[in-house]
Amino acid sequence: MKNDISIVLSGEAGQGIRTVELLMIKALKNSGYNVFSTAELMSRVRGGNNTTEIRVSNERIEAYVDKIDILIVLSKNAIFRIENRLTRDTIIIGQNNFIEEKYINGHYKIKDVAISSLAKEVGGLIYSNVITYGLLSGIFDINLNLIKESITRHFSTKGKEITDNNINAVIKGFKKGKELKLGIQVEKDEIIKNQVLLSGTESIGIGALAGGCNFITAYPMSPSTGVIQFLARHSEEFGVVIEQAEDEISAINMIQGAWYAGARAMTTTSGGGFALMEEGISNAAITEVPIVIHLAQRPGPSTGLPTRTEQGDLNLALYAGHGEFPRIIFAPGNFTDGIYLTQKAFNLADKFQVPVIILTDQFYIDSFQSIKSIDFTDFKVENFVTRTDKDYKRYKNTDDGISPRGIPMQGDGFVRFDSHEHDEDGFITEDPDIRTKMVDKRLKKLESYSKESIDAEIIGSKNYKTLIVGWGSTYGVIKEAIEKLNDNDLAFAYFKQVYPLPNNTKEILSKAKELIIIENNATSQFGQLIKRYTGMEFTNRILKYNGMPFSLEEIIEKLKGMQ
Amino acid sequence: MKNDISIVLSGEAGQGIRTVELLMIKALKNSGYNVFSTAELMSRVRGGNNTTEIRVSNERIEAYVDKIDILIVLSKNAIFRIENRLTRDTIIIGQNNFIEEKYINGHYKIKDVAISSLAKEVGGLIYSNVITYGLLSGIFDINLNLIKESITRHFSTKGKEITDNNINAVIKGFKKGKELKLGIQVEKDEIIKNQVLLSGTESIGIGALAGGCNFITAYPMSPSTGVIQFLARHSEEFGVVIEQAEDEISAINMIQGAWYAGARAMTTTSGGGFALMEEGISNAAITEVPIVIHLAQRPGPSTGLPTRTEQGDLNLALYAGHGEFPRIIFAPGNFTDGIYLTQKAFNLADKFQVPVIILTDQFYIDSFQSIKSIDFTDFKVENFVTRTDKDYKRYKNTDDGISPRGIPMQGDGFVRFDSHEHDEDGFITEDPDIRTKMVDKRLKKLESYSKESIDAEIIGSKNYKTLIVGWGSTYGVIKEAIEKLNDNDLAFAYFKQVYPLPNNTKEILSKAKELIIIENNATSQFGQLIKRYTGMEFTNRILKYNGMPFSLEEIIEKLKGMQ
Amino acid sequence: MTTIFDFDQIPETSWCPGCGNFAILKVLKEALGELNIDPKNLVISAGIGQAAKISQYINANCFNGLHGRALPVATGIKASNPDLIVVAEGGDGDMYGEGGNHFIHAIRRNIDIVNIVHNNMVYGLTLGQASPTSRKEFKTPLQLEGVSSEPFNPIAVAISLGASFVARAFSGDMKQMKEILKEAVKHKGYALVDIFHPCVSFNKINNFKWFKDNTYYLNENYDNTDKMEALKKAFETDKFPLGVIYTNGENKTFEENLITYKNDKRPLYKREVNLEKIEKLLASN
Amino acid sequence: MTTIFDFDQIPETSWCPGCGNFAILKVLKEALGELNIDPKNLVISAGIGQAAKISQYINANCFNGLHGRALPVATGIKASNPDLIVVAEGGDGDMYGEGGNHFIHAIRRNIDIVNIVHNNMVYGLTLGQASPTSRKEFKTPLQLEGVSSEPFNPIAVAISLGASFVARAFSGDMKQMKEILKEAVKHKGYALVDIFHPCVSFNKINNFKWFKDNTYYLNENYDNTDKMEALKKAFETDKFPLGVIYTNGENKTFEENLITYKNDKRPLYKREVNLEKIEKLLASN
Ligand SMILES: Cc1ncc(C[n+]2csc(CCOP(=O)(O)OP(=O)(O)O)c2C)c(N)n1
Ligand SMILES: Cc1ncc(C[n+]2csc(CCOP(=O)(O)OP(=O)(O)O)c2C)c(N)n1
Ligand code: SF4
Ligand code: SF4
Ligand SMILES: [Mg+2]
Ligand SMILES: [Mg+2]
């Protein structure tokens, strides 16, 4: 097997598959392999069937693939859901009693590895995890010391006995893996070792810290909760106030209080929770208090598929809240952008005093990839708070619509925020002319923002005839498909700022003869947005809304079919 | 003064101006005059300055006008806000000490009528109201018996003494009015007497009753509260369950329980409350429980201008709720349509099991007009509930996407509603293929609906070159403007169904050379919707967002300017 | 023991082995069965959470709606058809966190429903954050330093708001739980049953043994109609009392107060609209 | 008496002549003035309603936000800058109706704010519907048959949830109201002051006289640190007690529990971000 290998682990919720994934991708990366991993999980805590996919490649990869080169079976009933992803070349590894007859008798390459027995030899089934890690490490012939070190680190808080047992386990697995002699050949690259491995969740969390976030409150909701939990882990070091709200309405209002008093605050939620925040978002708009919201999408409506993925809430974010007001929406497609855009979100919220929404989804959040390390000294935490003077006017009418924002106790003025229509001082007014001016002032901020607007990125041929449009988490799969197709007529326009539409939108779209949109939803919400603003229509739409991300094969096949 | 007279009453909140308005328009209508009235009120209970406008005409009128022919001043500081609406011909009536020097010394026709003194003669300032009613009746020389009867009816529960005093008051006012000899000449029409006079609120309430509404719950919010209060007044007679909810979230969920159990339920709210309901709307979409929501718009964002008008929440309604699902949105522009569409909303919600939203606004809700009486036997309360059998499948996949809806205790099956993605039986599933089928099934309902979709109405020239597009409450003013302009190239397309776009949208729009949109908001939300679906662009936009409705003069002037 | 509320084919639950929810499911079905309730007359209105999934495993009518919103849905159901027996069910996060405002106001209404709260002192489905009933210092992936808020006291709050039936059970004692649930169903008016149960996956502190050690039965002499005594009990935390802590007889219910049913007891779905009356109403305007 | 909290030009209020809100406004300004509070250190976080408009009439910092949401906003403010004195203020509908869930959970957090509720037993701004505290049988344009729900008992609920300062005042007695407000501001931790006041426009039943006749002062010997005694008082409705009904000393506040302030007392706005640390954090991944 060469250069682009996909390993899938399949077992039950609660078996710790994600721990194996995490250990393994770290080991792979630290050995110089390009890695990418992603999980699909059922909405349950124990049982059922979950899988995780680890891709190992000689090239940069950021997409999910259908094909399974190596399948590790960790429980009964772990194959049927992914049966159609198996090929004649798939190597199925697992203990015989986990692999149903029909597969054993099928055209598959079965390797019987009695993980349970090995685990029991070490001390119990609980070691199956680490045996599996060892097994995979052996298959990839990873430096055994590196593996042992990782185990020592992982179990550092658990005491010597447990660590020793796990080292024992990992070695057992490792030997077994080497014995299998699968003949894996993937080119390594020293540079990868210097990269950093992280999850989508971490990209948002780190971006937030880099943006100066020092206050987060949220009501738990998959797949968004990881962000507050990440910040909680670093709250002491970075002085972040962490509070679980009683509901999402509390969260969206609490962060307004926080910004008002001088914090840089955010909340994190998913569609249902975001829906509950809409009145609050509208309130932020008229009081002109900055807010940053991370919206991690999952398939709706309502409870929908709580642990699966979709890009179905773009419209929700676009039109959230009653009344008319500007907002900024980012949709990072890779983790470098995730960090960068989240960081920027705080500066922009502070500067323009508008809601800034970071739109991700379960696929983005729960994936891992390695990125080049980032020079954070390039970042600036830009603070736009002004000292107030005695005559401070909170809603001063300015050319760019941005009124200087003061905070209490900094300066000589009073800071008066108001949710009614108000005059420049922040007092209630019903004067029709002031009303018109204030609406204009607020809307003007979007024009002012256009100077800082982030262009869509063109990937692929510069002389494209066909342009594929995508946004957010489909970045990786479209990019890889384009690379694989290597077609001089083809390019991909990656929108990481989805609203306002980037300044170059019309230009790049009108250069194309044919426009294809790819979205992980049923109604092509971004396509409709583009039509609404540019009048331009897509010739083809590739849409998927079954709860799963696009696979590389799927995109390649569909694109081929269109040419 | 002839044929089209506008009277404005101006005074403080709490003075009972609306009572005068109500009594007077009834008297006028019962005398055979065309009437229309509308109020603009401050967000306060006492004091400030409120005005109400009564138009009396020989023709059907449904619009607000700027010009004031007769101004009745009922308190101090009651003129400056409307100063720019006065002309040399305006007759200002009021007691001298309420009319500031500068007006007395201006070019106005002042009639000093000491309403307070007259009231005191009767028994106290409290009678100022009825004096004013009498005064206006005298000016229009309304049959005195009719006036007296109306007083007797109005005060029927207050005892003889109070009634007598008020009759006394009304006569005093009446005489004074006649004495003024204003020489009013408006043609009457016997037919008007048979018409019914009602408010926008009442049109929604009556439509709801006619739709079989037997359950309403709401959290009070101006300008929507009148609807639940109207139904409360008729709850005993019509068996309507009335409940004030603890918040809007409760209301939107409660009506789902109600429909589930076999009621025909609705809620009524304004923008902020509606925003809080969005998660619930999404829940209705996936559980496929019917819901009807009355959304009475007022200017946002957030608290905004609580007692004023705007068409700023179309987007809110269009995109409410997370995930992707169909909905139907009506926006009546006159009260006949208000009754008709609200009635239909219940049948459609029941049939298609989708959220149906009735979009009005403060101007619509708080206006009065008279309409032809309605033959309710034309209406059908269509009940689409099916008896369940043993194998009842709540989410049965059908050609039109509509699964028969059962209710508990009617039939042999169980009725299982579920907010997760589910199979046909209503059980949680994570199967990607079932997911896709269920999304398609739900979206299909919108296509099925298109057979019943309500076309936009063309008013004016059939051979138009310029088409004005409007929706909802701007109907009256655009219609009257068109009539006044009497231009063979001009027509008005009145959209009372705003979503889905009516089937004739493209056809009627493409017939025009020039497209003008008129909206009572800042960003032309309906124009954007049309562009999103048809790609068609408006050449001109007439937008207003200062909290006030369009005036007839304003529309005429703007339209003239465009030609 | 199978009951009429069991499915022919036992559905696969998504609960963890050892979870207290299994006992609650079993006992609830038995209690309803023993009360001879016709499943067709029963609706479970559930929220979202591990607890709320119980509605998926009972062979009856159900409305499995939004997180936190089981009570308004239940209220709408009961008010539209008072002949139905309505159970509003969910977890401690569901009912006291997201749904806290409905909890307060449903009690005030005294709607005749049974409100069952599976109280495991943790958010199970979202993998282990604190719930309103989590005890102080309880550590979670979100509350790394431990919970600092005062735990929500549903018993005391319900009594303070005038609830007419307030009970607490423990999933570890199926017999007593069944008795309590039966009484709750029989009670006319709002009935709260807060059920302690261990979450084996995310609450390692308040586990089976902890609940066993930290609860006791109200004794026979305890007068559960004395409000102040009941409140005293409600505040006990060294050991939490189990049983019907308070009941104050039967007050007029929400449905009984509705004018809609004053002269006509038929549920709404049996009624017809009188269009003529509407015509008259409009004409009289 | 003018205070530092008065505007140079007295703003026109939008309240009705005779409304209890005037007394509350006056007394609050005086109380704050007498406590020598610098208006620059004070924030009024208010909801929406006639009561909440008070924030428009006090010359200090304010956040006049959404109906029902004054408490979360206040929590965000106080947690970000504990040096501020934060008052969360609104009406009975605002705080106990729309904002009910925040009321519960703000108390549990014990955030050091003063929560002032203008309790006129009616929705004033929306023209007279019932509020959660409306008494039974109170008739309104929405409740034509009269209210049937049990009135919300903020005092009992707050005590049940562990509030450390729970008081009730009456706008008709400015002297006592001022004392209570001063104590509330001085109290460390969450302090509830529910103020009865007449709404002359929409509550013709619970008018000035009614409040006068239906309230009494807690006597000197009353021990307001005894929780059960306090609860007994909370349930009295023949005459409602006025005064500090319960206070249980001072517990650790929400802000004090935050790890953010453990080693660094500076409010958030004074802190700088250390980007190098973030670089290390990422590199360590
Ligand atoms: C509006 C909304 N917010 C958050 C969630 C995510 N969520 C699902 S269940 C749950 C809490 C679960 O805790 P609990 O109610 O105690 O039930 P348990 O799982 O412990 O039985 C949460 C926060 C949601 N579904 N909807
Ligand atoms: C989300 C939302 N729902 C409803 C309203 C309308 N509203 C404004 S004030 C108010 C209630 C007023 O009553 P209360 O809080 O008791 O204050 P009061 O006017 O009596 O002082 C309501 C329902 C609103 N502003 N926002
Ligand atoms: S997570 Fe906890 S509550 Fe949920 S099923 Fe597992 S043990 Fe039970
Ligand atoms: S409506 Fe009532 S509460 Fe509001 S200002 Fe008037 S009297 Fe006061
Ligand atoms: Mg729980
Ligand atoms: Mg009130």
Image (cartoon, coloured by chain):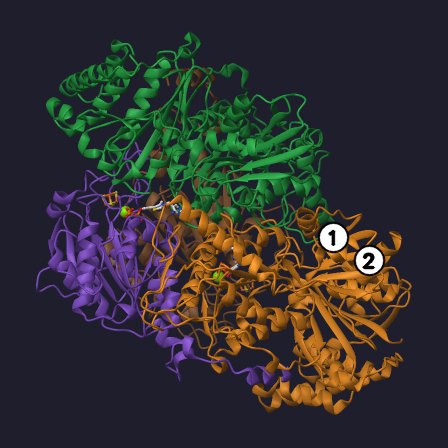
Chain colours: A green, B orange, C purple, D brown
| Quadrant of the rendering where the C terminus of chain D is positioned | top left
Q: Is residue A90 left or right of residue A201?
A: left
x and y percentages locating residue B294 in the rendered image:
56, 63
Query: Within the image, what quadrant is residue B370 found in?
Result: bottom right
Callout 2: helix, strand or loop?
helix
Please name the residue shown 59% across and 69% down the image.
Answer: B342
Residue B544 bears which disc, if any? 1
Question: Quick check: can you spot residue B295?
Answer: no
**Contact between labelled residues 1 and 2, with CB atoms less than 8 Å apart:** yes
Taking the image as shown, residue A314 lies to the left or right of residue B79, namely: left
Residue D164 versus residue B218 in the image, above or below = above
Mark 2 C-beta closer than 8 Å to ligand 2: no
Q: As shown in the figure, which amino acid type bears the numbered disc 2?
A: Glu
Please state which amino acid type lies under the numbered disc 1: Lys
| In the image, residue B19 above or below residue B193 | above
Q: What numbered label is drawn on residue D179?
A: none
Farthest residue, direction top = A190
Q: Which residue is mark 2?
A: B554
* Front one among D193 and B387: B387
Image quadrant where residue A49 sits: top left
Report the Cα–Cα distance between label 2 and label 1. Answer: 10 Å
Question: From this viewpoint, is residue D237 visible?
Answer: yes
Disc 1: CA contacts within 10 A as few (<14), some (14-19) or many (>=20) = some
**Host chain of mark 2:** B
**Percent x, y of residue A138:** 26, 15
Mark closest to the chain's N terminus, 2 or 1: 1
Which residue is rendered at x = 19% and y = 38% of the image?
C204
D248 left or right, relative to B94: left
Secondary structure of residue under mark 1: loop
